[in-house]
Image (spheres, rainbow, N blue to C red):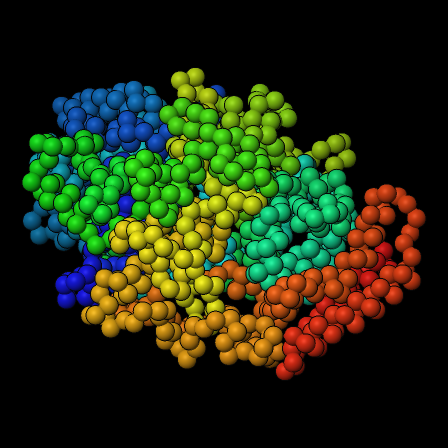
Amino acid sequence: MSGGGDAGRRPTVNVFGAGIAGLTVAHELAERGFVVRVVEQDTCLDRHGRRRIAMGGVARTQYAIARQARAGGAEGPWSSRFCRSDVEGMSAVAEARDLRLVPIHVPFARGSHEAPGGEARADIEGRVRALLAFLRGKDVDFRLEITGYADAHDDAPPAGPGSRPLTNPEEHRELCVERAEAARALIAAVAGGPAACTVAAGRQGERAPRRSDGKAPDHNRWAVVEVCFTVLPGEHGFRFFPSYYNHVFDTMRRIPLLDEDGNESGRTVYDNVVPTPNQGIVSGGLSPLIMPRSPPGSDHERAERLAALRTMGYTASDLTQLMLRVLRYMCTSAGRRAMEMERVSWWEYLEGYDPGTGARLYHYSERFEREAKTQSRVLASFDALWGDARTCGNTYVQLFYNWVRTLPKVDGTLSGPTSEAWLDPWRAYLERRLGVQFILGGLERLEVEDGEIVPHGFLIRLATGERPEGDDLTPRERELIETLRRADYHVVATDPCSAEAITEPLRRAGVAVGVPRDLGGFTTKVRPAPPEEGEGAPRPAAGAGHAFGVTGWDRFQTMSGIQFFFTQELKINNGYVYYSQAPWGLTSINSAQFWRRRPTLERDGFVSLLSIDLCDWNTRAREGAARGKSAAECCPVEIAEQVFAQIVAEMRPTGPTAEAPIYDPPEPTWFYLDELLDFDERGVFTRARVPYLVPIKADFQNRPGPPPWDPTPRVVSPPPAKTPDPALWQAPHGGYLVHWGKLVFAGVYLKTFTRMSTMEAANESGRHAVNAILDHLRLVKAPATMGAAAGAPAPSGAAAEAPASSGAAAGAPAPAPGGGRAGAASQDVRHMRSEVFYRSTPAGDYCAIWDMEHWELPEFAQAKQYDAWCLERGLPHPWDLLGIERIPSLVSKLAQAAGSPASPGAAGTEGASLDALLEGTLRMAYPWGGADAVLEMLRGIRRAVEEARKQA
């Protein structure tokens, strides 16, 4: 591949930020032959206590050392159960080695498993006492791991010349275990009672490790004592992989899992995603509702599931109205969603709110209304009163898909801690196979010098944490800094707060354009209440930064996680559990039950792990020691106590005759709270260092940068906005911007088809950044060598990009995303879900992009196309033309007002006239046929609604 102006030279790219977006950029570019350097300023501790470059952003595992367990398990105060990811605890193993406290070698005579006596025993006892005193002074939970070793020749019974080697595996293992047990008895005598120890047998031919003084043992008849700490895999929040994560899954399929020798095992990280069979809903002590995450196998099973929802206190009207609203959404075109549903909230949409008249179609029961308004907090940390209907509706439709289609990965979780199951193999692949270089350093600011964008950053020395400057830089460090500045492209893939700070010098200098211009005030100001627009008020200060979640419509909220670790088995459910009435918006999963290597008490120090997402930091607790306080007003211990109390309160039956399973769970031995949360000197929460961007209504267009571009063949993209500023470049077909010929941004705060702040959106955004670089390299940096013509790239398939009216009959809907017209056979419509054609550039294929709205139930594709045709002509939604919700709305209002019943005759007459109008417009929209299928589907829905009302 050639790039830049030098034929044969591989283009170079700096990626600032090693989160999901940054790693995606590095992966996609390196696979296309680019030289990629990833610069990350944060460090973390791995599961062995070693400091390393932090990988994966907020998705990575946050390892911590457990504190010393109190007698009796979890009976100590909650303050003694709080574990942190700190260097002091994680470095205790290294410190014990530096002091030569471990390993401790216990010698044995030939063929014997009797512990030594005399001076040798006294020396071992003294070393054991010193080790135990050191460990107890560290307040860390530990165990001693004792491994017995044997020599195949020296230990042959009977010892002496002519004896046969100890070749029988069972005899070898038995002798090793006996030696380890003898060492354990010696330690117990020194400790004054049983000590936390595990015993193991060395393999045949395995040599004992070096002694604490570094010398190699002169024989192999030993029991070797090592110290192991209880390492807790904490996290920012549990990882949730719904089946619509197409971008993430595509990347995972291209990350091989390596074996112990570094060779590819034939498995990929995608194989580490495990579907969860059930979803649990718990509500105020009612019997927990367990819903299988698969389509019902029969009408009877479908009826059972609906009946189960009724036990949650929802009325038949609630469920009917919700289903009608969801079906209407699935029949709605992308254009109407953009025009009507980005400016109303999800709750307003469920009510059928009309901003023009202020009228509402429906009223819901008090129970349903309360839980519908809070469920979205559990799903995505935003209130349904403020979250935009398009984002929530798109996500709801994708999750709904699992109820009607069998898919391979449903509500997936990982088969181990996130770093071990995903991020560590990803880094190994990028470094060992693709040559990506990871650099510990950071980006301080961006400036324009002589018309060129220049990154100003720093390097960090891993061993000391120092930031060398000036004369302190080594020649190699100076060369690296200069190499980073000379790169062909720079990709800023940091969080939005950092991105705004990095680009501030550009705004002060008055040269900011594109994303740097749009970032001004994006995180440092609080937008006005929708639908009002404006600059917004300055964000209040909090701790070392700004406060988030200041108002319900604040685009940045706090969403974080807490993990409880138990020495007993505790599952709650074989999947995710939603606590619908928990004030703090809780959802949980026992992820350890899905791990390939499930934790055991002897080896890991804990048996089960309950990972909980805490999504509402502003609602006040109703009970307990933190009663009347929100999570944002509590210290870590209060948060942990209250979260556990809310879960137990939701699970336990209420009232003397309540029917629910007995629920008396064990208390956790330890808990871990996200290290990205800051607390003041009093221990009270101040802010989240990485806030959660939520999709507030009327706010999506305020996100920095232009709309995304979908390179899928036969998907017609709208023409991009003009970019007259010479500092900006955008491909003719649209997509992300290239600033000053080399600067591109990636992150969840930019516009994506996923819209919600998830790993999927981060991955998608990284792909858009790569596609922008591929276009710029082809059309600007190397047009001659790559033979590119100005204009949109031609697809590799037969279909070419064309205006919406190209190749279609006048007045007809645009072609379907996967090909075919609105009247095509249903099989052709379904084929859009298996589109495999890619568009290519001389530097390689474009990154594949999945627009969620093109990947919905194919049965509704024709209805969506017809709605797009109606929208273009200023006509109402076909759903409204047919009057499907007119009768349910009338019934809902009558029930609310407790008035007289409606006249069925009037409704029937109006329905007939609406039928005629709908049929007429359908015949015009589908001159080649196909109108009958859409008309029959909509009429069928209306008939089902009317029949249900008659039965009710």
Left or right, 609 with reference to 625: left
Q: Is any part of residue 452 visible from this angle?
A: yes
Left or right, 118 with reference to 838: left
Spot the residue most to the top: 682
As displayed, is residue 709 above or below residue 495?
below
x then y, percent, for residue 646:
59, 32
Q: What residue do we see at 82% from left, 68% from top?
A: 913
Spot the residue most to the bottom: 928
Total marks placed: 0
Say which of 180 and 609 sits in front.
Answer: 609
Say which of 468 and 272 sits in front.
Answer: 468
Q: Is any part of residue 272 visible from this angle?
A: no
Left or right, 819 with reference to 603: right
As displayed, is residue 349 above or below residue 562?
below
Q: Quadrant of residue 842?
A: bottom left
Say which of 644 and 251 sits in front.
Answer: 251
Q: Quadrant of residue 677?
A: top left
x then y, percent, for residue 527:
51, 36
As displayed, is residue 57 above or below residue 825?
above
Q: What residue do we see at 68% from left, 76% from top?
A: 924
The quarter of the picture where the N terminus appears is bottom left
Q: What residue do we see at 38% from left, 43% from top?
A: 517
As displayed, is residue 800 above or below residue 688?
below
x then y, percent, for residue 235:
41, 39
x then y, percent, for residue 814:
55, 72
Q: What residue do we see at 8% from left, 52% from top?
A: 162
Spot the residue most to the front: 724
The quarter of the picture where the C terminus appears is bottom right
